[in-house]
Image: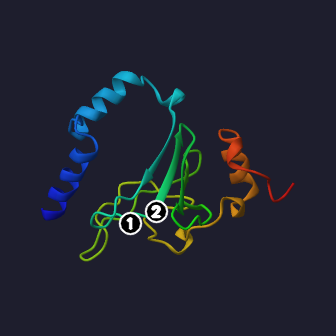
Amino acid sequence: MEGMKIWLTETRKRWPEARFITQGEFGLLWRDHYKSNETVNYRFAQRGSGVRGSIEALEVRWFMNKDFRLALQRNWKDGTPEKVIDFTRYDLAAREPLDPTPGNHTRNWSLINRINQKGLRPEDKPVPLESLSKDDREFIKAHYPGLFAKDSTE
């Protein structure tokens, strides 16, 4: 609970007008605004706060649309290159994570196929965007061509 108090206090300091709503309220607002997922295409960046388990120097850029979700992480303080920490294609078979066993992660909500941010499998090791398969790069490029400065196969 101490961590929750710190998180809420820091949130209120940064955004004094913030209003906290339940996940259910958010879901209803989202569904009211987006009648289908066909037009969903959003991007955002999140930076760690340094509070508790949040690593201040890490930044994650998320890209989500009806076809996939992609997360690129970097240390913005050191200027390290971004690496893919999460990439799930919705056109491929995916599975939900197994139920947790005692002592293992318990916040495993996301579908898994290519690379998953939870790092539960050997293939979940972060990789440079350019090292994804050509098929995966083309799939991403159809939505976000600006992510690729120069395709390594061209």
Q: Report x, y in % for residue 91.
A: 59, 45
The numbered mark at residue 10 is none
The numbered mark at residue 55 is 1
Rendered image quadrant of residue 78: bottom right
Q: Report x, y in % for residue 95.
A: 46, 57
Mark 1–mark 2 CB contact (< 8 Å): yes
Name which residue lies at 30% across and 74% down: 104
Neighbourhood count class around disc 2 (C-alpha, 10 Å): few under 14, some 14–19, many 20 upward: some
Kind of element beneath mark 1: loop
Q: Report x, y in % for residue 21.
A: 21, 37
In the picture, measured across the screen, residue 133 lies left or right of residue 92, that is right
Name which residue lies at 34% across and 22% down: 32
- Return the residue at label 2: 58
- Kind of residue indicated by mark 2: Leu
Report the front residue among 73 and 75.
75
- Kind of residue indicated by mark 1: Ile
Name which residue lies at 53% across and 75% down: 122
Report the front residue among 43 and 115.
43
